[in-house]
Amino acid sequence: MHMKLTNKLGDILEESRPNLAPFESLYRHIHSNPELSFCEEETSTIAAEHLRELGFEVHTHIGGYGVAGVLRNGDGPTVLLRADMDALPVEEKTGLSYASTKTAKNKDGVEVAVMHACGHDTHVVSLMASASLLHKAREHWSGTLICIFQPAEELVSGARAMLDDGLYEKIPHPDVVLAQHVMPMKAGTVGVISGRLLTAADSFNVRIFGKGGHGSAPEVCIDPVVTGASIIMKLQTIVGRQVPPGKLAVVTCGYIQAGHAGNVIPDTLDLKLDVRTCEESIRERVVTSVKRIIRAECESAGCEREPQIDHVSSTPATINDDATVQALRETFGSYFQDRLVETGPANASEDFSLLARAVNAPYVMWTYGGVDPQTWDDAVKNGTVKKLPSNHSPYFAPVIEPTLQTAVDAMSLGALTFLKRN
């Protein structure tokens, strides 16, 4: 019975999978035309039009450029599939014929290079192709299929924006929520793990208020640059001294900006901080320590104003539901066989889980590979796997095949695992 069931699922994929050539072309187009977070106008239009053509009920402009498509196909569970659409402010250096040369203004009005350095273009196109496959296969299943194209995952704020804009007033509540992410793994492989996949993330924008003046007269100034440098160094003690050994925590200062001239002490200094943790108790401790150190260093420097500490984004850890993972392992294992590989958790973060948490639904995000198989095998042989370009690298370039077909098959199989089978 079990083999028949999974063979049947494999047969459904083979007979219903659309011709992927147009989707491969579309992938090149989206890769060449990346859009920053909350600016995904063209990408969302492409996705929405595709769902409309298939006969989905389509909702657009949810929380910015978010798209939700609903395909009702009789009685049965409601399964939500999610892809994120936004690119990154990274200058592409892949040398691909379809590499991005685009620039765009970021939210601060600064012109930046833009690149799909995290593979969201493969997520979008594979979900579009999966929607086609599942639509064609609808005699084999019943239930409700929801396809979400989400903005602004890179700011970990797009899922929250969609929820705040009434997502679940527009679409049914899902019984299970699924997503996938391309990673520096061998193309053609898929990995799914139970429990923690990704960390919680907290971002802070900080402004230190000093007192500016001539660089030659520091005694009549309060130098925010020295204070900022002191804060950055002190923050690095949190992980080593306040987090138990063996517990995961990362504190990063990725942005520091102050002044315009070497001989002028500026009035203010701006920092942008990034915190990653897994456990809620560790997260609370680290966040509290970050704020305490910033305030204490400012007081120590004699700053006359309290620092401004804005907690600009926060997303919980991605904790895959065990029962849902076991069901996926069964169908994925039978279909992908030795291409279902062992993977571990990552220190990156995602806001996808909020779409499930909002309605208390179980959720799983799995990963699939994008590294050319020969390149991967050579790297394994030479012990250089860690040197392969990873997500957010200017050299990140998933091979189109077998990456795309693997993603389409995995997403479709994921949905069919939970929809009612006819």
Image (cartoon, grey):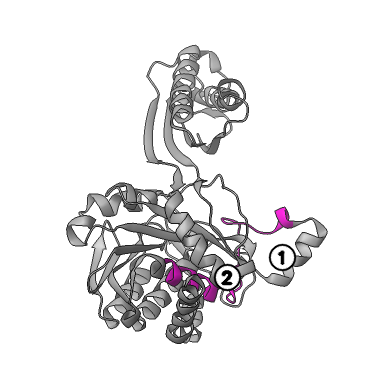
Using the image, determine if residue 241 lies above or below residue 248.
Answer: above
The image quadrant where one finds the C terminus is bottom left
- What amino acid type should be assigned to the residue bearing mark 1? Trp
Q: Which residue is mark 1?
A: 376
Left or right of 393: which side holds 292? left
* Residue 95 can be seen in this image: yes
On whether residue 402 falls in the magenta region, the answer is yes
User: Relative to residue 348, is residue 144 depicted above or below?
Assistant: below
- Which quadrant holds residue 127? bottom left
Q: Nearer the viewer, residue 290 or 378?
A: 378
Quick one: SS at disc 1? Answer: helix
The local secondary structure at tag 2 comes to helix
Pick whichever, 85 or 416, lies toward us.
Answer: 416
CA gap, disc 1 to disc 2? 18 Å
- Image location (x, y in percent) of residue 414: 43, 66
Image: magenta residue range:
385-414
Tell me if mark 2 has few (under 14), some (14-19) or many (20+) residues whose alpha carbon lies within 10 angstroms of its own. some
